[in-house]
Amino acid sequence: MEKIILLRDYVKDNDGALIATLETYLRGDGATPMIQAMGGSGSNIIGYKDNGEAIIDERADTAIEAAKTKLMAEAIKEQKKFCIEKGVDPDLVNIINAERGAKKNE
């Protein structure tokens, strides 16, 4: 069974209400982590764009972006360690899609 690492963070407002949940899955394959943001209570959504994308309150949006940056830094660090453990070049992690052209060190 393939080992997968899940990193998760919860973004909350000053009152402790959940704004969003952030997640990424690491496989040690050299891929740049992708952070997925999922909505919280919905109270921070103030409308929707024509394409269906939620319009989020500016303070909530700022908090989510700051949390994404922090989680991305942690995810890159952990993905690089996991790559080394699996014999994959950790430098691939910094370049999006670089893992597609690389081969595992054996």
Image (cartoon, grey):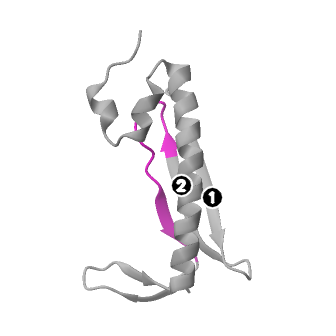
**Residue positioned most to the bottom:** 46
**Image: 57 above or below 80:** below
User: What is the magenta segment's predominant secondary structure?
Assistant: loop
Image coordinates for residue 106, horizontal then vertical, percent: 41, 9
**Residue positioned most to the top:** 106
* One can see residue 91 in this view: yes
Whether label 2 touches label 1, CB < 8 Å = yes
Circle 1 sits in a helix, a strand or a loop, which is it?
Answer: strand
Image coordinates for residue 85, horizontal then vertical, percent: 56, 21
Image coordinates for residue 71, horizontal then vertical, percent: 58, 54
Image coordinates for residue 24, horizontal then vertical, percent: 51, 49
Within 10 angstroms of label 2, few (less than 14), some, or many (20 or more) residues?
A: many
Bounds of the magenta segment: 25-40
What residue did someone put label 1 on? Answer: 9
Please, what is the three-letter code of the amino acid marked with disc 1?
Answer: Asp
Residue 51, labelled with which disc?
Answer: none
Residue 23, labelled with which disc?
Answer: 2
* One can see residue 30 in this view: no
- Residue in the image at 50% along x and 44% along y: 25
**Image: 27 above or below 13:** above
Q: How many marks?
A: 2
CA–CA distance between discs 2 and 1? 7 Å
Does the magenta portion include 100? no
- Residue in the image at 56% along x and 49% along y: 73
Image-based side of 50 in relation to 99, left or right = left
**Image: 53 above or below 93:** below
